[in-house]
Image (cartoon, helix red, strand yellow):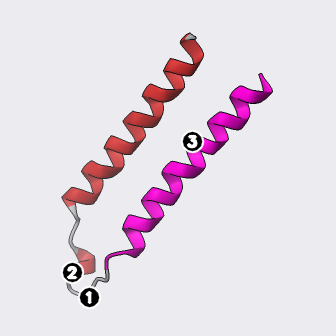
């Protein structure tokens, strides 16, 4: 169970770092910061779904 927890924490840290990289990589101006970026939302949902799929895979095995 300890290895499951450590691998889960490693995966969560990886996905969080990837999301932080994409968030800090774009510089926004005051006018564009008010708009919702659909591509970033879609990418965040995709990362979340991949994380859920990995966790389900770990729990099934």
Residue 13 appears at what percent x and percent y? Answer: 59, 51
| Mark 1 in CB contact with mark 2 (< 8 angstroms) | yes
| Mark 1 in CB contact with mark 3 (< 8 angstroms) | no
Separation (CA) of disc 1 from disc 2: 5 Å
Q: Which residue is mark 2?
A: 32
- Taking the image as shown, residue 51 lies to the left or right of residue 13, namely left
Is residue 7 shown in magenta? yes
**Against 26, is 8 above or below?**
above
Number of residue marks? 3
Q: Looking at the image, which is closer to me, 19 or 41? A: 19
Look at the numbered disc 2 and give the secondary structure of its residue.
helix
Separation (CA) of disc 2 from disc 3: 32 Å
Viewer-nearest of labels 2 and 3?
3
Separation (CA) of disc 1 from disc 3: 32 Å
Residue 21 appears at what percent x and percent y? Answer: 44, 67
Nearer-N-terminus badge (2/3): 3
Q: Which residues are magenta?
A: 1-26
Q: Which residue is mark 1?
A: 29
């Amino acid at each position: 169970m300890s290895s499951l927890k450590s691998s889960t924490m490693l995966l969560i840290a990886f996905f969080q770092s990837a999301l932080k990289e994409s968030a800090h990589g774009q510089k926004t101006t005051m006018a564009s910061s008010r708009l919702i970026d659909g591509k970033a939302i879609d990418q965040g949902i995709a990362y979340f779904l991949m994380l859920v799929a990995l966790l389900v895979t770990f729990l099934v095995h």
